[in-house]
Image (cartoon, rainbow, N blue to C red):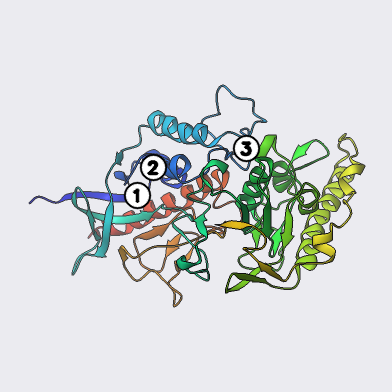
Amino acid sequence: MSVEKINTVVVGAGQAGIAMSEHLSQMDVPHIVLERHRIAERWRSERWDSLVANGPAWHDRFPALKFSGISPETFPPKERVAQYFEDYAKMIEAPVRTGVEVTQVERLPGRPGFRVTTSAGVIEAANVVTATGPFQTPAYPKIVPESSGLQQLHSSTYKNPGQLAEGAVLVVGAGASGSQIAEELRKAGKTVFLSVGEHYRPPRSYRGRDYCWWLGALGLWDEVKIRPKKEHVAFAVSGYEGGKTVDFRRLAHAGITLVGLTKSYRDGVMEFEEGLAKNVADGDQAYFDVLREADAYIEQNGLPFPPEPEAWELLPDPDCLSEPILNLDLGAAGITTILWATGFKFDYSWLKVNAFNEKGEPFHKRGISAESGIYFLGLPNLVNRASSFIYGVWHDAKYVADHIVLQNGYMSYTKSY
């Protein structure tokens, strides 16, 4: 059986894979993009019905193509985002092969490159770019047994309130997904409990500019100002209902009961960590820090942005915040569903190369891995906080493509005599 050979294989045709293909094409690097489903599949089938992009259309896009048919200030719905990437792939004539799953990548013995085993055959490539993104395998603590009788689902399989059992809902996780889903369920008439841990809660907009604009103006996308960072802190920002600041006090006053970080489950009772009030207060502090920096920037640059004094006002603490629930009998509370909005973990079981650290995480610098010829793209903080966003992944891909070209040059070099 003949083996196809190509310089670079890109695994995944989401935003990272399409961006990678554009830069490789511009640099004349022969490549193919392999996608096991459809282009931007996770936007289509692994998100809830009402999901919209977290950034406005003027910002969450690639430089060469604007969103058509919608206002630049709109937060595009998920199907429109998926269509954008499909249109983009056509525009750049990306060599995407859909319906092809990569099952294994291993280094070729005794010669450069990798053997890429797929559902459609074997490919040999000098380079492999893993563009499968940060949202691979749903992650949630297996603390509630299936025998509990509770309906349990992850945010990646949630579609709409109609799929949930009758009764109240405990949403675990208060980042972008959990906070939006909790609000949607409450508006659908559900009794909702929301488990809130540590989080970063910026303003959706301030003084006439969206947070994406402030990230750029204040240098926060690039994190030029070095700040201590905590791992696994939820990013609570949303484009839901036209875009509004995630405000846990507002959610509580709208009827959602806040509880602390989910700790354990036993005999029908869920236990929550102490520190709910501190988590909310820390989120408030991060919010006010952005407002202060924005005000200073406006004054420094003499910008005519109108004041927004109401942005500095906080609603009163609800009872669930001042007198937090530490133990909750789920049956007595009428809870029949637990919705885990607890994020994802990586699955690189198919990548049989020396590109990981002792924790099994990608070992890389700006996407260039410890295994020569293996690259990562689209991961959180690959370069900075923009890296897992549409805006940022395009720029990261340009850097990776440039490195591939440089390495190709080394491998093709012949000494002249």
Q: Which residue is mark 1?
A: 10
Q: Secondary structure at mark 2?
A: helix
Residue at image point 77% right, 59% down: 283
How many marks the image carries: the answer is 3
User: Residue extending furthest front?
Assistant: 332
How far apart in space, not on screen, are marks 2 and 3 (Cα)? 21 Å
Q: Which residue is mark 2?
A: 21
Residue 394 pos. (x, y %): 51, 44
Q: Which residue is mark 3?
A: 59
How far apart in space, not on screen, are marks 2 and 1 (Cα)? 8 Å
Q: Is residue 301 shown left or right of residue 132? A: right
| Numbered disc in front, either 2 or 3 | 3
Quarter of the image for residue 57 reads top right
Q: Is residue 384 shown left or right of residue 25? A: right
Mark 1 is on which residue type? Val
Residue 315 pos. (x, y %): 87, 51
Q: Nearer the viewer, residue 196 or 411?
A: 196
Mark 2 is on which residue type? Ser
How far apart in space, not on screen, are marks 3 and 1 (Cα)? 25 Å
